[in-house]
Image: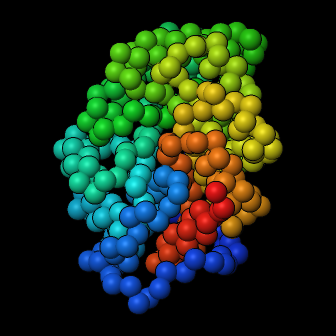
Amino acid sequence: MKRRDFLVTGVASGAAAISGARVSSAQPQSATGAQSGNNKNRFKLKYAPHFGMFKEHAGYASSPTPNNLVDELKFCADEGFTAFEDNGMRGRPKEVQEQLAREMARLGIEMGIFVANDRGLEKGVAILTSGDESLREGFLKNIRETVEVAKRVNTKRVTLVVGNSFHRLQHGYQTANVIEGLKRASGICEPTGLVMVCEPLNIYRDHPEFFVSSNAQMYALMKAVGSPSCKILYDIYHTQVNEGNIIPNMDRCWDEVAYIQTGDHPGRGEPFTGEINYKNVFRHVHSKGYKGILGMEHGNSKPGKEGERAVINAYAAADRFEV
């Protein structure tokens, strides 16, 4: 499954049932069908859903309207979520970006990441590794556009993917090309305070051609770039698939981590649908004093409203760790 496909449609992987944290049906319902009023301080950490994760509660089945998206934001706020991310925000019409930003501000929802560069995962394109100047200029054009969108939607974090390997060059030359591209992009972002969070992607299941497949490799790149505007996106799902050792790896690269994303494995669903002990992971993140966002970059293990409620229950249960 491609990285973004599940962000719109969700995943139906038939995961195990989730135990714990069921919301009482006696609570009052909001206009969007959410339990309302008492969930503002529900979570210890800032978990961020994405559009499509709660589409049934927001009243759309496939193609959402801007009003549907607003309804989904309202539902998330009612359920106690205080952050949100949208990989596709850069591609939305300007007026929709502005509408969504106003609604998030009204609801007290912090905007997380969106994807900064549109060719980062395109098949056969080595956007930064090849050193191709035309590809690099297209990448930097994306970054300049991204700076303006980030201002519009009130975020200081955007996802950046460095792209695929270029097999006609040795690894060291590719590394040098990536560092040069990231340094130039950092020069664009630094004056605005925007931080590009660069994500290692697993090569064993989802992205076999991707250049940066481990947190250690990304950590070395970040040290070489040396910019406050270029940091690591620590994706727990990709880490588990590619290298495991989630907590020790997190500790080793922590001084360069600026954003975290979640997803269980196998199946890339919500917590408790795979092998990761998310209660322990979230406890560790909290113990490190992390105040940032944890993006819920995964699908729903079950379809329909039942599956959407299972996602909420899973995060409520995983968040119920001892401080």
Query: Residue drawn at (38%, 23%), measured in percent from left and top?
Result: 193
Where's residue 314, x and y in %?
59, 69
Q: How is the image coloured?
A: rainbow
Q: Is residue 146 above or below residue 288?
A: above
Residue 162: horizontal and vertical position, in percent? 58, 26
Which image quarter: residue 251? top right
Q: Quadrant of the C terminus?
A: bottom right
* Residue at (64, 41) in percent of width and height: 288
- Please say whether residue 34 is visible from this viewpoint: no
**In the image, 61: left or right of 11?**
left
Residue 288 or residue 312, whichever sits in front: 288
Q: What residue is shown at x 26% (from left), y 77% (from top)?
A: 31
In this view of the protein, which residue sits in the foreground, 94 or 192?
192
In the rendered image, residue 153, in percent from the top left (x then y), is placed at: 29, 40
Instruction: Left or right? Give the position of 271 relative to 151.
Output: right
Q: Which image quarter: residue 268?
A: bottom right
Please say whether residue 308 is visible from this viewpoint: yes
